[in-house]
Image (cartoon, rainbow, N blue to C red):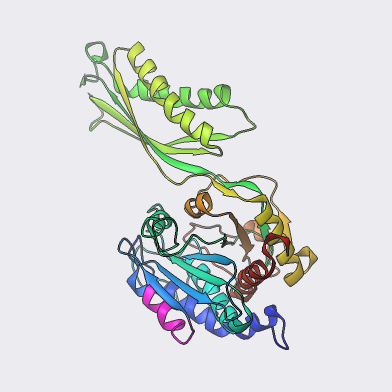
């Protein structure tokens, strides 16, 4: 940029980036409808030459910057908006004012960094060929917000008024990662996540006479153990599967055998093949064990997000941008996927691109001891945020100019 590097330009915007983050943090919102957050974004960027679009299903926004240097590629940058249903225990001056709701996953930070990137890119709009789409997305925390925004046509696609973008990028903060480090990996970055519910049905009765009942509790326990054996013995360790039963409900009193026992949990997979296979195998396993004891078992799978798959070319591209902007030591190739999940996966199913992580632990602190995301005490070092804005803007400018080969 004229007379200054992109990083220096971002640093000059630090106050406005931090102010937006704090305003959003203090009034967190959950789910697909986050009107206060939407309004804060629009107010913060109202002075910029952006075209705004909203859809009927969510309060999600897409702001489009059309470059002044002619037609060209299009690139999408995404920041998620929603918070989590949990209390905040950070003690910050700008802590949540909404009881039981907190920005504990850094989405407030994502929005503010994306808004900072919008300011950086608008400042050089006359030299950009093509367009940048800024995707402000609610409903990431289990509500499938990205899928709804795609279905509403906000990102474009067949049957809508413009094609899908040529590339898509997202940046997610990590409080328990080294300060300022950007990380990523090709292929599976994050897992598919599905919810699991198993109901074992027997026949209840007096706890002193189990022989007159069909007790579902020990059968439920047997199924839990058998699931772990199935995962370890039926699925390859080189294509990991995680099934965790996190809740078991049964009974009403110490001397009553219930009619049913219910288990709920999560299923995590790193490939579409294992995801589909697991959905087929679990009902057979549960029904077989229950049937061997004269009971019945029903399995319900509630589909969550797909695997977050990053295009290898997009990851190479992001690494080059990070090192050019922020120094040779700025980027880390992650050796392994993370078994968490992300609904940016829906975008990456349609558009080549990648998600990256940004370490936001406090400079000089032992990042291994920091509270991670989804903690009531999760905090970020706000001094890293302009770095994130510069990286997002750098991805856009480089891609519009040269594509993956830049």
Q: Nearer the viewer, residue 390 or 248?
A: 390
* Residue shown at the point (66%, 49%) measured from the top left: 186
Q: Is residue 41 magenta?
A: yes
Vertical arrangement, residue 253 with respect to residue 120, above or below: above
In the rendered image, the residue lying farthest to the left is 205
Vertical arrangement, residue 69 with respect to residue 102, above or below: below
Q: What x and y, as percent, mark residue 339?
A: 55, 44
* Residue shown at the point (62%, 77%) measured from the top left: 128
Can residue 62 be seen here? The reply is: yes
Q: What x and y, as percent, mark residue 147?
A: 41, 54
Vertical arrangement, residue 368 with respect to residue 136, above or below: above
Residue 386 placement: quadrant: bottom right
Q: Quadrant of the N terminus?
A: bottom right
Q: Is residue 183 magenta?
A: no
* Residue shown at the point (37%, 54%) measured from the top left: 143
Q: Nearer the viewer, residue 79 or 380?
A: 79
In the rendered image, the residue lying farthest to the front is 71
User: Which region shows up in magenta?
Assistant: 38-49
Q: What x and y, as percent, mark residue 271?
A: 55, 37
Q: What x and y, as percent, mark residue 368?
A: 65, 56
Q: Quadrant of the C terminus?
A: bottom right
Can residue 93 be seen here? The reply is: no
- Left or right: 86 as drawn, with respect to 344: left
């Amino acid at each position: 940029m004229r007379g200054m590097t992109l990083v220096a330009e971002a640093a000059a915007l630090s106050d406005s980036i931090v102010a937006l983050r704090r305003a959003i943090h203090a009034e967190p919102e959950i789910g697909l409808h986050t009107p206060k957050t939407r309004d804060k974004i629009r107010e913060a960027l109202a002075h910029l030459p952006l075209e705004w679009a909203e859809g009927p299903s969510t309060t999600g926004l897409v702001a489009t910057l059309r470059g002044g240097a002619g037609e060209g590629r299009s690139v999408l940058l995404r920041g998620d908006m929603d918070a989590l249903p949990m209390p905040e225990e950070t003690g910050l001056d700008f802590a949540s004012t909404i009881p039981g709701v907190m920005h504990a996953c850094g989405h407030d930070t994502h929005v503010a960094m994306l808004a900072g990137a919008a300011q950086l890119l608008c400042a050089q709009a006359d030299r950009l060929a093509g367009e940048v789409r800024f995707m402000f997305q609610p409903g990431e925390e289990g509500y499938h917000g990205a899928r709804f925004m795609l279905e509403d046509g906000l990102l474009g696609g067949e049957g809508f008024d413009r094609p899908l973008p040529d590339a898509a990028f997202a940046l997610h903060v990590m409080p328990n990662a080294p300060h300022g480090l950007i990380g990523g990996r090709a292929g599976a970055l994050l897992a598919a996540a599905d919810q699991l519910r198993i109901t074992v049905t027997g026949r209840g009765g007096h706890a002193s006479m189990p022989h007159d009942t069909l007790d579902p509790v020990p059968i439920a326990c047997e199924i839990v153990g058998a699931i772990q054996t199935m995962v370890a013995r039926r699925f390859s360790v080189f294509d990991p599967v995680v099934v965790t039963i996190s809740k078991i409900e049964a009974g009403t009193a110490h001397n009553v055998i219930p009619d049913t026992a219910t288990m709920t949990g999560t299923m995590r997979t790193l490939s579409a093949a294992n995801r589909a296979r697991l959905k087929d195998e679990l009902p057979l396993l549960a029904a077989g064990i229950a049937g061997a004891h004269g009971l019945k078992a029903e399995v319900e799978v509630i589909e969550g997000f797909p695997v977050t798959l990053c295009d290898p070319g997009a990851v190479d591209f992001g690494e080059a941008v990070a090192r050019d902007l922020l120094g040779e030591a700025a980027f880390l190739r992650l050796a392994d996927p993370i078994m968490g999940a992300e609904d940016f996966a829906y975008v990456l199913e349609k558009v080549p691109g990648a998600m990256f992580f940004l370490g936001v632990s406090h400079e000089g602190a032992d990042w291994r001891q920091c509270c991670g995301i989804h903690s009531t005490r999760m905090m970020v070092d706000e001094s890293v945020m302009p770095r994130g804005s510069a990286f997002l803007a750098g991805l856009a400018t480089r891609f519009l100019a040269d594509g993956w080969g830049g």
